[in-house]
Image (tube, grey):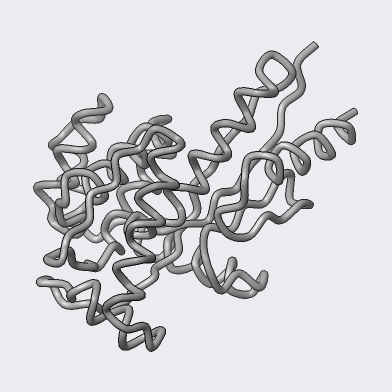
Amino acid sequence: MTKSIKIDFVSDVSCPWCVIGLGNLDVALKRLGGQLTADIRFQPFELNPGLPPEGESRFDNVARKYKVGREQAIANRERQRGLAAEVGFDMVTTDESRFYNTFDAHRLLHWARIEGRQEGLKRALLAAYHTNMQNPGDHGVLVAAAESVGLEGAAARDVLTSGRYTDEVRDAEERWRRAGISSVPAVVVNDRYLITGAEPPEAFEQAIRKAVSEVA
């Protein structure tokens, strides 16, 4: 008999380490295939709240926030690219790459959860930003991603233009902050086991096995 677990995946669309963390979680779940069903819930976190519509250079952003020089930023970028490739994800980053405001993407993901398509939309948005270098704050990009996973484009656009789910996303962000989440990815299994950062598959597998063993 398979057991069911809940996985809260706190992340941002523009977070490269979240891509790698999700890939490693996928590997762990494949290793446990047939033993459980996982309800993955993508929770909102904004790495760069308040960015203007045109976004900000990734180099400038990293230098400002983390005091990282250009050479180190390039080395980090190449490391992320390699780790993403290991889990089958094509991460494309250039000197022209930018960070953008992702709040509307989180609102759309909240709606997609209600519609039963959240995981598909999350993966589509990760590909749009990290592989296709598209702006995840652009409504056209968001609507196209929604349509690609079977959501109705007109309904997606209505969510975006109406401002719907603003309060819900803000409340969720605050709830995770109060829970102590200050960086992403942060993955919580069955409200009990926390994995922070893009840990290897073994870390996810260990936490999931512990959670499964406790399910009656």
Q: Observer-nearest residue: 60 or 112?
A: 60
9 sits left or right of 46 in the view: right
Q: Position of residue 191 (x, y in %)?
A: 74, 51
Please say if 74 is above or below 135.
below
Q: Residue at x 15, y 45 (%)?
A: 157
- Asked which quadrant contains residue 32, the reply is top right
Q: Position of residue 55 (x, y in %)?
A: 16, 72
108 sits left or right of 84 in the view: left
Q: Observer-nearest residue: 101 or 153?
A: 101
Q: Which quarter of the rendering shows the N terminus?
A: top right
Q: Position of residue 182 (x, y in %)?
A: 56, 74
Please say if 24 is above or below 75.
above
Please say if 179 is above or below 88.
below
- Asked which quadrant contains residue 164, the reply is bottom left
Please say if 70 is above or below 156.
below
- Asked which quadrant contains residue 65, the reply is bottom left
Q: Position of residue 216 (x, y in %)?
A: 90, 28
Q: Observer-nearest residue: 136 or 67?
A: 67
56 sits left or right of 11 in the view: left
86 sits left or right of 100 in the view: right
